[in-house]
Image (cartoon, rainbow, N blue to C red):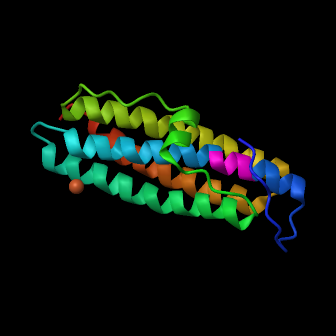
Amino acid sequence: MKTTLLKTQNDLPKKVRSKVIELLNQNLAEILDLGLQAKQAHWNVKGPHFIGLHELFDKVAEELEEFTDDIAERAVELGGVALGTIQIVAKRSRLDAYPLNIASGKEHVAALSGALAKFGASTRAAIDTASKAGDADTADLFTEVSRGVDKLLWMVEAHAQSKD
Ligand SMILES: [Fe+2]
């Protein structure tokens, strides 16, 4: 999805900016999808651990929202257009569709853990891609995002890591 590169006095070469904007927009589509998946879990979870999970899933969505803004704005800072419409998200996101017919905490923990892990892995890969492209700042942003997502994954996944 190519968009026009806007003029900027940012000294990163045009070629680097183009490549990284594309990478940021791919990541943006997926983090928007992931944020909605966390909300889907927040709204629909049921069972004995309801309140803890309901609140945790909302915290996940809130933290992802901050990263989302940083990712979108970085694309614009580099002279790009942030591609964050729902139509683009639906077309571009490589995350699995969130299941609609689950209810228990266990099922939502499994579904959201899987989505967080998949997004975390592709964000980790994006660190290298941005770094090799010659944009250390975007690599640093992806490092921050993947570290944050690892932490969120831990907080969700911990519910499934013990039988007590
Ligand atoms: Fe809510």
- Residue at image x 61%, y 39%? 122
Q: Which residues are magenta?
A: 21-25
Left or right relative to 68: residue 1: right
Q: Nearer the viewer, residue 130 or 16?
A: 16
- Most common secondary structure along the magenta stretch: helix
Report if residue 161 is visible in the image. no
Percent from the top left, x then y, of residue 25?
Answer: 64, 48
Q: How many marks?
A: 0
**89 horizontally vs 162: left or right:** right
Residue pictured at 55% horizontal, 51% vertical: 84
Which percent across, then down, holds residue 90?
50, 36
Q: Residue at x 78, y 54 (%)?
A: 4
The quarter of the image that holds ligand 1 is bottom left
Which of the 4 image quarters holds residue 17? Answer: bottom right
Name the residue at the bottom extreme.
9
- State whether residue 28 appears in this view: yes
Q: Nearer the viewer, residue 119 or 96?
A: 96
Q: Is residue 22 magenta?
A: yes
